[in-house]
Image (cartoon, grey):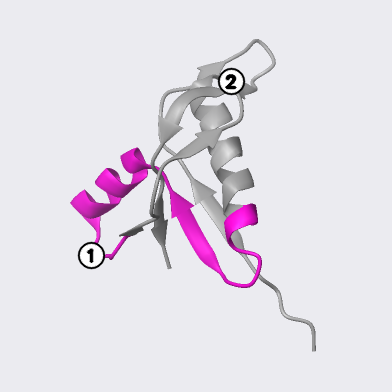
Amino acid sequence: MKQLHVAIAMHSGETIVDMYGDRQGTSINMAARVEEKAKKLTKDENCILVTEPVKELTNQNFSVTIEPIKGFYTLKGLSGKHKDKLSQ
């Protein structure tokens, strides 16, 4: 039987709605890049990859454990290095 592996990425931030109703901005780009990173990091496991803003919002409202990924990562199209958090 073939297994299904799920990689979910979450980011929270401000967006801009264009004249067609589509959302744009750095937060949208960040979410897309974190999703790409989640797919690469989790080929054999299920996981949820969240950014620091989501971790902070989650800790304020829910009782969950979020474990850090070791190191910093570059994300395509976004300057600097980013430290994501991994929750399994």
Q: Specify the amino acid type for callout 1.
A: Ser
Q: Is residue 78 left or right of residue 59?
A: right
Residue type highlighted by circle 2: Gln
Cα distance in 3D space between marks 1 and 2: 31 Å
The local crowd at label 1, few if under 14, some if 14 to 19, many if 20 or more residues have their Cα within 10 Å, is few
Query: What is the x, y in percent for residue 3?
Result: 72, 80
Please, what secondary structure does the residue beneath circle 1 have? loop
Q: Residue 88 vs residue 64: left or right?
A: right
Give the left or right position of residue 29, taking residue 87 as reference.
Answer: right
Percent x, y of residue 4: 70, 74
- Mark 1 sits on what residue? 63
Region rendered in magenta: 39-66
Single out the residue that lies furthest toward the bottom. 1
Residue position for label 2: 24
State the SS at label 2. Answer: strand
The residue carrying pointer 2 sits among few (fewer than 14), some (14 to 19) or many (20 or more) residues within 10 Å by Cα, namely few
Seen from the viewer's position, the closer of residues 21 and 42 is: 42
